[in-house]
Amino acid sequence: MILGLVLLAELQTQEPTELVVHEWGTFTTVSGAEGASLEWRPLSGGDDLPRFVYGTGGTPRGLRHGQTCKGCSHFGCGCGEACSPDSRGNCNKCKTCYVATVRMETPILYFYADRETTVSVKVGFPQGKVTEWYPQARSVGSGIDWGGVRVLPQARPEFPLEKGESHYYPARETDSAPVRVCGNEGVQHEKFLFYRGAGTFELPIRASLEGGKTKISSTEEISWVVLFDNARGSVGYRILRKVVGEVRSDVAEKCGAVEQLGEELVRLLIGDGLFEKEARAMVKTWRDSWFEEGKRLFYVVPRRITDAVLPLEIEPKPAKVTRVLVGRLEILTPEMEKEIRALVERLGDRSIESRDAASRALKKYGRFAEPLLRRVLRSTEDAELQTRIRKLLEQE
């Protein structure tokens, strides 16, 4: 309580400061070849975050001043216990049960100031749940409230670090000011405010496969869209500008140009308002995931939609706020479904080597194996195959 009053006093008495806030992040969705947006379990994949990052599973941690997670004390626990899911399959009991259409990945809030200042920061997420975050926050649920955050432009604090690679660390490679948050977990410093989540809401683009081309349908003008394809290492892409309504396109000839595409994306992100180091940090963060095998779209989400999905409140108000959320739309092709079915069939082979090889091949699909398995489950009448798929889904 005393700490809260001190932070409030700082907010009321500090001199005006030139504060600029930049944000980037990704909305990942999954589509069938016919263009239907698919429900999936975006939290069932492996964890790519350091252990110091907080999550909503088990005993709530990372919550300041005795606050608690709102309605999610068991969310993310992975306990495997029986639960009573709602109509969408969500039960708030275990992580793998959570069904959604969108994975909100790694929004990063950067702060730039000409002097030390204290701000209060809150992000709403009315159509979803925040599932990971750092530093500690005041409350977490359908949004996140960090409360008072101290911006330290001249400070050079040590940030938490663990051995091993992670998608988390490249986001620090910018000129943003460090931030400090104090609470039950002590004093924490970071280069940004980080959060992730999942939810169900509409995004402006859909895509389907028709006659060797991709049909892109957009409900409003999108300033750029990248159509990308990686077929067993053979890479091609095409950049489309000002996409609205229906557009049909194929990718460029296979050119193996992942590095070239990375530079193109950096330029696009700078054009949307990110600083160069921020744009490079974003591409570096997601390079291995964005350019993995498969067919997908990348596009910049219109600011109006970002503000509606993730209403951001910062007090005192910054001089400028730039928000660049990139949509990633993963297209599950008929070829992928055919291969998944064949691999599941091979799991019943007498040969141990064949079964092991099929199991390894299934893993390459990562978190997208689950929606592919569900599509095959709905399309097959083979009872043995259905049983095998259900067992795989239980393991996801």
Image: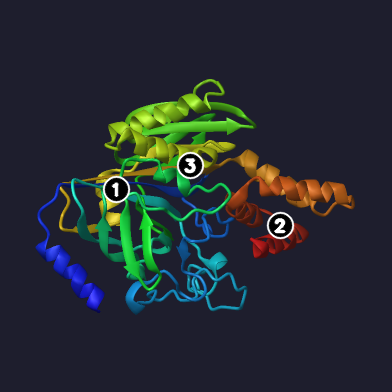
Q: Is residue 158 above or below residue 269?
A: below
Discs 3/1, front: 1
Evaluate whether residue 224 shows in this view.
yes
Quarter of image, res 102: bottom left
Residue placed under numbered mark 1 in the picture: 177
Q: Nearer the viewer, residue 211 or 225?
A: 225
- Percent across and percent down for residue 210 are 51, 34
Quarter of the figure with the N terminus: bottom left
What amino acid type should be assigned to the residue bearing mark 1?
Answer: Ala
User: What residue is disc 2 on?
Assistant: 381
Look at discs 2 and 1 and give the one toward the viewer. 1
Q: Secondary structure at mark 2?
A: loop
Q: Which class describes the residues within 10 Å of circle 3: few (<14), some (14-19), or many (20+)?
A: some
Which one is in front, 269 or 243?
A: 269
Along the polypeptide, which appears first: circle 3 or circle 1? 1
Crowd tier of the residue under label 1, counting other residues whose Cα lies within 10 Å: few below 14, some 14–19, many 20 or above: many
- Point out the tag, 2 or 3, that comes first from the N-terminus: 3
Residue 332 badge: none
Q: Secondary structure at mark 1?
A: loop
The residue that appears at 44% across and 74% down in the rendered structure is 72
Q: Residue at x 68, y 43 (%)?
A: 338
Tag 3: amino acid:
Trp
